[in-house]
Amino acid sequence: MNERHIEHDLITPYYPESNGKVEALIKIINREC
């Protein structure tokens, strides 16, 4: 992942508020499908 400059951030499981942007994206995707 370093050669592609990708960061791997660990978040607390079962706590969606800590990863709000991704959770919002997943919510939109689920609503559209």
Image (cartoon, grey):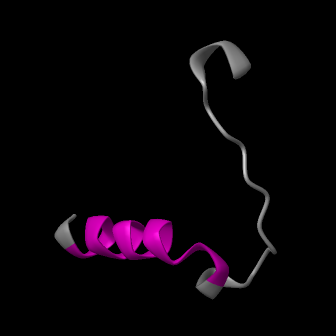
User: Seen in the image, is 25 located left or right of residue 19?
Assistant: left
Q: Position of residue 31 (x, y in %)?
A: 24, 76
Image quarter where the N terminus lies is: top right
- The answer to which image quadrant residue 33 occupies is bottom left
- Residue, x 79% and y 58% (percent of image)? 10
Q: Give the main secondary structure, helix, strand or loop, of the magenta stretch.
A: helix
Say above or below: 21 vs 18. Answer: above
Say above or below: 8 vs 30. Answer: above
Q: Position of residue 7 (x, y in %)?
A: 67, 39
2 magenta-colored: no
Which residue is more in the foreground, 2 or 14?
2
Give the mark count: 0
User: Seen in the image, is 31 located left or right of residue 20?
Assistant: left
Q: Position of residue 2 (x, y in %)?
A: 72, 20
- Residue, x 81% and y 74% (percent of image)? 12
- Read off the magenta span: 18-31
User: Seen in the image, is 24 located left or right of residue 29?
Assistant: right
Which residue is more in the foreground, 3 or 11?
3
Spot the residue most to the top: 3
Q: Position of residue 28 (x, y in %)?
A: 27, 72
Spot the residue most to the left: 32
29 magenta-colored: yes
- Residue, x 71% and y 85% (percent of image)? 15
- Residue, x 47% and y 65% (percent of image)? 22
Say above or below: 8 vs 15. Answer: above
